[in-house]
Image (tube, helix red, strand yellow):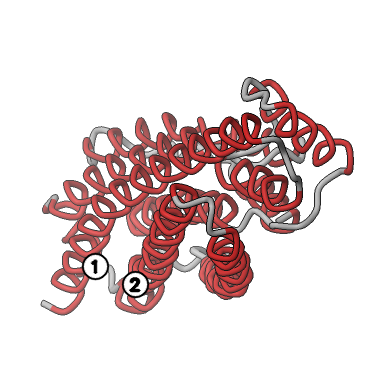
Amino acid sequence: MADSTATTESRCHVRSISMPSRSHPTATNIEEELNRLRALESLSSTAQSGSPLKEESISVALFGLVELYKCVESFLQMPQTQQIMVQHQLEALVDELIEGPVTLLDIGGTTKDILLQMKENVLDLHSALRRRKFEEMLGNKVGTYISFKKRVKKDVSSCLKMLKRLEEKCVVCPLLDLDHDSAMVVRVLREVNSVAISVFRAILSFLSTPMSKPKVGRWHLVSKLMHRGVVACDRHEESMNEVESVDVVLFALTRCNPSKDAEVESSQMVEKRLKDLEDSVESLEEGLNFLFRRLIQTRVSLLNILTN
């Protein structure tokens, strides 16, 4: 998904907020967490080089985002913050402030559905491989997986458009009419939204790695290795993430006709790749579940402040 990875690269930079720590001590914690999430810039480098994003890097950023929202909750509970939001009439920006968590919850829901369906497809492929003698069953499961990947591409495209609209809305509303303290509060929440958008873009890019035919050399190499029963070809997959790695071995498995011994080893290779993807999906699911609770709490806190 070249377009989404390019977009990730252009949006991953996290800026310093430079907030006054004396009047808003918790804001310092937020800035520290944002600085830790500068690790997102490594995702930018990966995307810029054309290499698929790996799950491990995304999970680190995802759990870092959970910690960031914990700081945001403390920030919103501070009397100073609540007084600024109420007394300085930030109600005019209420739609923008609340829309961030709401939009991210919607996208997170779609992402969780994709992860669930991906895990189900992986389990089906596991089952088909264990009964490899039923070639038609394996072919059907692979076909189902390919159809699923095509649906994922459409769902991800829709989510990316939502993220873009959310991002553009923050740019449209200037802070020129706000006093310093009010502008600082809004800027904090916008920065949090910005880094959250970057993390979600990375997750969506990971899930929508296209199942298109890569360079001929790569397919030929994997197919050749599987013919020979060679399993140790990890060094040739360094440029692939867990999703693309499964795509490659499935393609090769269904298109080569190895010997019986090679067939056993090639099936073991596919099993390993499927297990790696299953573990990756479960890690992302865990992080999203934690993040969901934080996003809901942030939305509730904002509503309570702005409506009371």
Which residue occupies 29% across, 45% down? 66
SS type, badge 2: helix
The amino acid type of the residue labelled 1 equals Arg
Is 208 situated left or right of 38 in this image? right
Q: Nearer the viewer, residue 139 or 148?
A: 139
Looking at the image, is 237 positioned above or below residue 305? above
Report the amino acid beneath label 2: Val
How far apart, in angstroms, are the residues tagged by discs 1 and 2?
7 Å
Residue found at x 26% / y 54%: 289
Tell me where residue 10 appears, x and y as whole percent. 68, 48
How many numbered discs sit on the rendered protein?
2
Say few, some or many: other residues with alpha carbon within 10 Å of mark 2 (under 14 / 14 to 19 / 20 or more).
some
Q: Position of residue 74 (x, y in %)?
A: 16, 46
The residue carrying pointer 1 sits among few (fewer than 14), some (14 to 19) or many (20 or more) residues within 10 Å by Cα, namely: some
Q: Give the residue at mark 2.
A: 102
Q: Work out whether mark 1 precedes mark 2 in sequence or the reverse, and give the earlier one.
A: 2
In the image, 23: left or right of 220? left
Q: Residue 65 sits in which quadrant?
A: top left
The reply to whether residue 11 is in sight is yes
Is 262 located above or below residue 293 in the figure?
above
Viewer-proximal residue among 249 and 100: 249
Classify the position of the C terminus by image quarter: bottom left
Q: Nearer the viewer, residue 212 or 180?
A: 212
Q: Which residue is mark 1?
A: 299
Q: Which mark is residue 143?
A: none
Helix or strand or loop: what does disc 1 sit on?
helix
- Which residue shows up at 70% across the image and 33% down it? 226
The N terminus: image quadrant:
bottom right
The answer to the question of whether label 1 and label 2 lie on touching residues, with beta carbons closer than 8 A, is yes
The extreme right residue here reads: 216
